Image (tube, helix red, strand yellow):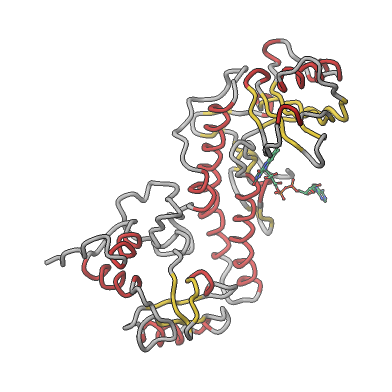
C-alpha cells in the first residue's frame, strides 16, 4: 500500500489485519445431481459447516468456503484433503458421496477502509480503497461506481476544463458510500454465518441489496445539496427515486419524435440539462456557460414545444409540484408520478 495508512475503525469496530476472519476455499469435484433433482442453484449456505457450497463450471465442479476459528485452536494447515472431503459430505448431507479435492487455499474475509482516497497524484479505486466482505456481493459494484465517479473528473481536469479541486470531490462522494456499504456487508456476514471469534460488533439493520447497489445518496461533493429531512439516510429505494441532487436520475418514459424513450437513454456519455416546458431561460443560461461546449452539454426541453414530450405529464407535474411545495422531500418524484397516474391527489398550494 506504499505510503497509505489503512483505517480499520469502522463504527466502533476495530478490525486489524490479525483480526480479519479466516476462511478456507476448497475446489472439488462431486456428483450432487441426485440431491439437486434438476434444480439450478447459485449458492447454498450450510449451517452444519458454517459455510457455502457454490456450483462452478460443468455439472460436477463445486467450491466450498468454510470459516474456521484460530481461537478454538483451528489452523489452515488442518484442512487437509480428508477433512475437506468430510466437510463436503456433511454439507451435502450424504456420507457416501465420492469427493475429489482439486485445490485448498486459505483466505481472509476482511473489512478495511482507506482513511484517504488520494495522495498527491495517486487515487485509490476499488479494493485498494475498501475491502468489503463478499456477503452481499457489493465489493466489485462499489469499485465500478468509484471508477465511474473518478473517470469523468480526471478527464475534465486533464483537459483543463475544470480545476484540480474537482478531484477532491471524489473522496467526498465515494468514501461515505463505501463506509455504509461495508457496514451492510458486515451485517449480512453476521446474519448468515456464525462468528466463531466473536470479533464483530452488533450489526446494523439490513436494508435491501438494490438500495445498497443502486440507491446511494451523495450528501456533498460536486453538487448543490437540497435541504431535506432525511439527508442522513445513506441509501434510498431505487424503485422510488427522489431525483434530488446527489441521487441517481429517475427513469421516466418520454416521447421523442414519436418514439418512446426513457430519461435514462438521454444520459449517454454527456452532460444533460432537462427542463420543463417553461425552461427555455435555463437552456439559454446553460449555453452561456463557457465550459458548456467543452463538457458537450446537451439541453432538452420537455413539453409541447420542446424536443421531448411527456404524455403522462409526470415532469410537468413535478415542476409545478416543486413550485407549490417547496422542500417537498425525497419522495417528490414518486409523488408526482403517482399523481400523474391518478393514484394521488395533487398537493394543495402552500399559501
Ligand atoms: C469470495 C468473494 C466473492 C465476491 N463476490 C462479489 C460479488 O458477487 N459481487 C461484487 O460486486 N463483488 C464481489 N466480490 C468482491 C470483488 O471480487 C472485488 O471487490 C473486486 O474484484 C475488486 O476489483 P479491483 O479491480 O479493485 O481489484 P482486483 O480484482 O483485486 O484487481 C487488482 C488487479 O491488480 C493486479 N495487481 C496487483 N498488484 C499489481 C502490480 N504491482 N502490478 C500489476 N498488477 C497488479 C492483481 O493481480 C489484480 O488482477 C467478491 C469477493 C470475494 C473474495
Give the image quadrant in which the ligand numbered 1 is located.
Answer: top right
Q: Which quarter of the rendered picture does the C terminus lie within?
A: bottom left
Q: Residue at x 46, y 64 (%)?
A: 249
Q: Which quarter of the rendered picture does the N terminus lie within?
A: top right
Q: Is residue 129 depicted above or below 109 in this figure?
A: below
Residue 57 position within the rendered picture, expressed as x and y whole percent measured from the top left: 80, 42
Looking at the image, residue 71 sits to the left or right of residue 310; the answer is right
Q: Residue at x 55, y 24 (%)?
A: 200
Q: Residue at x 64, y 55 (%)?
A: 144
Q: Is residue 140 depicted above or below 289 in this figure?
A: above
Residue 233 position within the rendered picture, expressed as x and y whole percent measured from the top left: 40, 46
Residue 24 position within the rendered picture, expressed as x and y whole percent measured from the top left: 76, 26
User: Which is more toward the observer, 138 or 10?
Assistant: 138
Which quadrant holds residue 329? bottom left
Q: Is residue 13 depicted above or below 79 in this figure?
A: below
Q: How many marks?
A: 0
Which quadrant holds residue 254? bottom left
Which quadrant holds residue 193? top right
Q: Residue furthest left?
A: 351
Q: Residue at x 40, y 55 (%)?
A: 240
Looking at the image, residue 187 sits to the left or right of residue 92; the answer is left
Residue 68 position within the rendered picture, expressed as x and y whole percent measured from the top left: 70, 19
User: Which is more toward the observer, 211 or 183?
Assistant: 211
Amino acid at each position: 500500500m506504499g505510503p497509505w495508512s489503512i483505517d480499520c475503525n469502522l463504527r466502533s469496530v476495530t478490525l486489524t489485519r490479525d483480526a480479519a476472519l479466516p476462511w478456507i476455499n476448497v475446489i472439488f469435484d462431486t456428483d450432487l445431481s441426485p440431491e439437486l433433482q434438476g434444480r439450478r442453484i447459485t449458492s447454498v449456505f450450510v449451517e452444519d459447516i458454517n459455510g457455502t457450497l457454490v456450483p462452478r463450471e460443468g455439472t460436477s465442479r463445486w467450491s466450498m468456503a468454510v470459516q474456521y476459528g484460530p481461537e478454538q485452536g483451528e489452523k489452515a494447515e488442518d484442512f487437509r484433503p480428508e477433512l475437506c472431503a468430510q466437510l463436503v459430505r456433511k454439507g451435502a448431507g450424504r456420507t457416501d458421496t465420492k469427493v475429489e479435492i482439486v485445490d485448498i487455499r486459505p483466505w481472509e474475509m476482511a473489512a478495511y477502509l482507506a482513511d484517504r482516497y488520494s495522495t498527491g497524484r495517486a487515487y485509490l479505486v476499488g479494493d485498494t480503497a475498501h475491502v468489503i466482505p463478499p456477503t452481499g456481493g457489493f465489493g466489485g459494484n462499489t469499485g465500478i461506481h468509484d471508477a465511474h465517479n473518478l473517470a469523468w473528473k480526471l478527464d475534465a481536469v486533464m483537459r483543463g476544463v475544470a480545476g484540480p479541486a474537482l478531484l477532491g470531490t471524489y473522496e467526498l462522494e465515494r468514501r461515505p458510500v463505501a463506509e455504509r456499504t461495508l457496514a451492510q456487508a458486515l451485517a449480512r456476514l453476521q446474519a448468515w454465518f456464525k462468528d466463531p471469534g466473536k470479533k464483530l460488533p452488533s450489526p446494523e439493520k439490513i436494508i435491501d441489496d438494490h438500495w445498497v447497489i443502486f440507491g446511494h445518496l451523495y450528501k456533498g461533493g460536486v453538487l448543490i445539496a437540497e435541504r431535506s429531512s432525511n439527508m442522513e439516510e445513506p441509501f434510498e429505494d431505487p424503485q422510488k427515486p427522489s431525483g434530488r441532487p446527489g441521487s441517481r436520475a429517475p427513469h421516466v418514459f418520454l416521447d421523442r419524435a414519436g418514439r418512446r424513450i426513457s430519461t435514462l437513454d438521454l444520459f449517454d456519455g454527456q452532460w444533460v440539462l432537462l427542463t420543463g416546458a417553461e425552461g427555455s431561460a435555463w437552456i439559454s443560461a446553460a449555453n452561456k456557460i463557457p465550459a458548456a461546449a467543452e463538457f458537450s452539454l446537451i439541453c432538452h426541453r420537455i413539453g409541447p414545444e420542446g424536443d421531448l414530450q411527456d404524455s403522462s405529464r409526470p415532469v410537468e407535474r413535478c415542476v409545478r409540484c416543486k413550485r407549490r411545495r417547496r422542500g417537498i422531500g425525497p419522495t417528490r418524484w414518486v409523488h408526482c408520478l403517482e399523481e400523474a397516474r391518478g393514484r394521488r391527489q395533487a398537493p394543495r398550494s402552500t399559501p
